[in-house]
Image: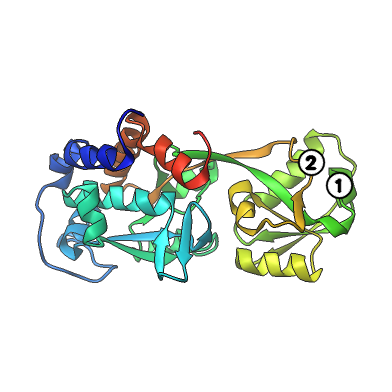
Amino acid sequence: MSISRRQFIQALGLGTFAVAGSGFLAGCSSDTAGSGSSSGDGSSKIQAIKDRGKLACGVKQDVLGYGYLNTETNQYEGLEIDLCYQLAAAVLGVTYDEAKEKELCEFTAVTPKTRGPLIDNDTLDVIVATYTITPEREEDWDFSTPYRTDSVGIMVMKSSGITKMADLDGKIIGVSQGSTTKDAVTQMLSDQGIDATPTFQEYPDYPSINSALESGNVDAFAMDRSTLNTYMNDNKELVEPDIEFGTQDYGVATKKGSDLSKVVDDTVQELLDNGWMDEEIQTWLGASA
């Protein structure tokens, strides 16, 4: 790009989100309420956010580049954290920089098991947490246009002797509770005609799977490659990384039928169209979109 990242974002914050003045965003209030509050008539999610003054966001805290809680600064950082601030800016009618400076997002760490229920009970307004869009999930929640595509990988210890997918026969693969990873691995083995029947052990979070791998309680750790990259080191490797499978689109989830859903989708689409998302992917993941 011909302008700096700071210039780009400043210009974006000043001019991009005309949606903030649309009918969807009318009726701003400076009153503050709890995270689960709703508007007076109980129907407007946008009004509830305005009344509260902050956007309640479900994010990952252990995925580098996406949503990560930096223990040194005690601050969340990553592509999805920045995206949350863009969404807050759009809903609350401020610039992106103002949303960050005023900390207009309340972050809650979620897991694949907790993220859906926290949307349903209005604890959270949006889930921006490497949430894969599937037809089944779209029946229960609204999803934005995909902002990032990833695929599944299988990570092992180099000392395990597992070098190809067929070596997974009879092995234990650690996966996250509530994720689509188990089905993706099973489908890949079938599609590739690989004669291997592993078993799967579910864990509540990614650090637990990684610990199980390193201690030998599981033989492999299967998850989105972006997640696996968080735990990769010189002692670990992906099994046959050239086999790409389980390709999945990440979207922002909102409550089904919420008036917030359109604003979220419009904002994500705008960020894709104007190149902001491409720049974020390069900055945080060192990759092209």
Q: Is residue 42 visible?
A: no
Q: Which residue is mark 2?
A: 240
Q: Is residue 171 above or below residue 143?
A: below
Q: Position of residue 144 (x, y in %)?
A: 39, 41
Say whether marks 1 and 2 touch (CB < 8 Å): yes
Q: Report whether 43 appears left or right of 200.
A: left
Q: Position of residue 224 (x, y in %)?
A: 62, 48
Task: Please tell me which residue is depicted at 78% across the width and 34% down the height of the picture.
Answer: 191
Element on which disc 2 rests: loop
**Amino acid type indicated by mark 2:** Glu
For this rendering, which residue is in front, 80 or 27? 80
Q: Earlier in the sequence, mark 1 or mark 2?
A: 1
Quadrant housing the N terminus: top left
Q: Report whether 201 appears left or right of 74.
A: right
The CA span between labels 1 and 2 is: 7 Å
Q: Which residue is mark 1?
A: 163
Task: Please tell me which residue is depicted at 17% across the width and 58% down the height of the picture.
Answer: 50
**Label 2: how many Cα within 10 Å (few below 14, some 14–19, many 20+):** some
Q: Position of residue 38 (x, y in %)?
A: 22, 63
